[in-house]
Image (tube, rainbow, N blue to C red):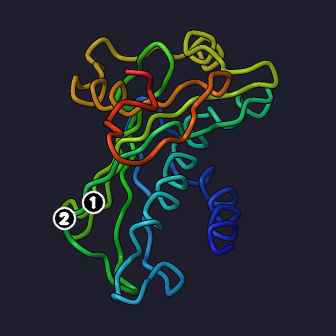
Amino acid sequence: MHMLFRFLALLATARRRPALSLFEPGSLPMRALLTDIDVAGHINNGVYFSLFDLGRFDLMIRAGAWDVMRRNGWSPVVQAETITFRKSVVFNQRFTQETRVAGFDERCIYFEQRIVADGEVYASAHIATRLLSKHGPVPNAEILAALGEQPPADLVLPEWVAEWRARTALPGSRKPAPHHWGRGARDGALRGE
């Protein structure tokens, strides 16, 4: 529930910060709240992804993408995410959340997001996202046309991110994805390899 209040506060304040292009990095100042902290005294690993949601919304609002999405009835969804931790953020510590578009493939828009404190990266994540309409996934070309922006020529999805996504992708929602665990189960069985 605390993220709902943070999201509402973000909606009320994001438009007061400087406008950005979708392809500029966004920075969102934050503080570790008591509701973010686990029994180890630092931000819970699961909370980071919720905080990253706020960073993506901040960038989308400041870049005008949020208004375009609402006009078109598009909803953002996460398809995959990965995170690496370096240092712990503790209760009441100030930090910024840095968000940028990392690249595209034929289906997803990828974001790189970081938690930064005292000029150092504490955690780094990559998130594969899509926009959905009532008719299904919205093609990236349609999204970019609606936004009136094209990615910079030097924006290339890192090869390791493309490989990570290909290796971890589950079957589409209209394909079967049976659950089988047990002896002899091998990696990739769910993906039909």
The residue tagged 2 is: 86
Q: Can you give x and y, in whole percent of width and height, for residue 12 in the image?
A: 69, 60
Q: For the residue marked with disc 2, what is the amino acid?
A: Arg
Residue located at (33% from left, 83% from top)? 90
When the figure is inspected, residue 11 is found, relative to residue 110, above or below; the finding is below
Residue sitting at x 49%, y 82%:
33
The x and y percentages for residue 26 are: 42, 46
Circle 2 packing at 10 Å, graded few (<14), some (14-19), many (20+), is few
Q: Which mark is residue 123?
A: 1
Where disc 1 sits, the SS reads strand
**Percent position (x, y) of residue 144?**
56, 16
Of 93 and 44, which appears nearest the observer? 44
> For the residue carrying disc 1, how many other residues have a C-alpha within 10 Å: few (<14), some (14-19), or many (20+)?
many
Find out whether the residues at labels 1 and 2 contact each other: C-beta distance under 8 Å: yes
Residue 100 pos. (x, y %): 38, 39
Secondary structure type for disc 2: loop
